[in-house]
Amino acid sequence: MNEFALIQHYFKQAAVVTCNDSICEPCEPVVLGIGDDAAIVQPPAGQQLVITSDTLVAGRHFPVDTPAHAIGWKAAAVNLSDIAAMGARPYAVLLAISLPDVNPDWLAQFSRGFFDCCAPEKVQLIGGDTTKSSLLSITVTALGWVEQAKAIRRDGAQVDDLIVVSNTLGDAAYALKQPKSDLQHRLDYPQPQNRLGMALNGYATSMLDVSDGLAQDLGHILTASGVGANLHLENLPLSATVQQLPQPQAWQLALNGGDDYALCFTIAAKRFEQFCQQYARQFELQVIGQITAGTGLSLLHHQQPYTMNLQGYQHFD
Ligand code: ADP
Ligand code: MG
């Protein structure tokens, strides 16, 4: 199978099939999708383009024996998560893939996983690139829209804001250490929180998605906003499995483990109350701390200072 047949079969056709699906209707029209030199999209009036790119390399971002369906899912999910973290509405993705060989089964599973993640958000694949390389590598670019100047950035946290996270923390890091545990799906199938991200627009003062460990990622909000934070360890949301670990170990996973793809945001206490009233029980949210006038992250356990090594994932260490 040559490159053009491969694109046609696994990416263009699959995209059309998914978009005819009832779950995907009504898709916002793309002016021109896969097939020409470049895609064309028409920005909605008054909206800003939010754009992001993330690469997954075999053996680095996922174990080499990860099922193709999960790789496809995750490649889309980590990018949709970044769009969610801006409070934007995801719109379309581009997929640049380098493959060691053409394995029809693998490609069928991969593309299905990719579209399974995109379909619920009505996100369409509008282009990309396909090359041969000894190492499997996947780069996805995601596009989203947000009302003019309404994106939720990292630099908006205010003193006394609550710090809130969605979803349990440390599960993916646990699965990486304990393959085939009951948390394996949390590593293989991160759930981008797009509905929550959009709902928080107009409520959250700052936000990001937790991909490299909560402590490091929350640190980015603190630095960008010029504030500090108190974090209450007893409030960290942990799954039942992680909770069974000795406490310091569970906190290590929750604070330093990567790949959670939860959203972490700051919000004024009053606005949080209003948000919870409006979206009663639609989202699992946990208040884990407050923004302070200080600098850096202070850990507290039942109000007592607690010391712990905080180091998230870094590529060039
Ligand atoms: P060019 O040589 O002009 O870069 P390509 O042959 O690489 O064009 O791609 C042909 C068309 O297929 C383009 O519209 C491109 O965006 C699309 N395409 C290529 N690879 C992929 C892919 N992996 N997923 C989705 N679209 C792709
Ligand atoms: Mg090309």
Image: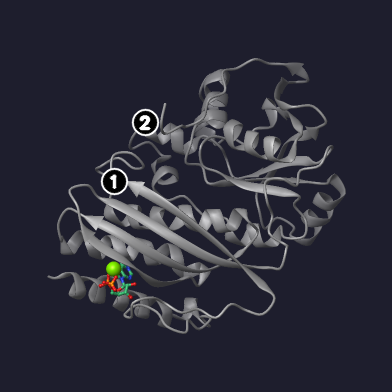
Disc marking residue 66:
1
Q: Name the residue at 51% across, 34% down.
A: 170
* CB at disc 1 and ligand 1 closer than 8 Å: no
Instruction: Please name the amino acid that badge 1 sits on.
Output: Thr
Instruction: Please name the amino acid that badge 2 sits on.
Output: Gln
* Crowd class of label 1 (few under 14; some 14 to 19; many from 20; radius 10 Å): few
Horizontal relation, residue 147 to residue 131: left or right: right
Q: Residue 277 location, x and y as percent? A: 81, 57
Disc marking residue 242:
none
Q: Which residue is mark 2?
A: 178
Where's the N terminus, which quadrant? bottom left
Which one is earlier in the sequence, the residue at label 2 or at label 1? 1
Label total for image = 2
**Taking 142 as reference, is 300 above or below it?**
above
Q: Residue 141 location, x and y as percent? A: 44, 60
Q: Name the residue at 17% across, 48% down.
A: 134
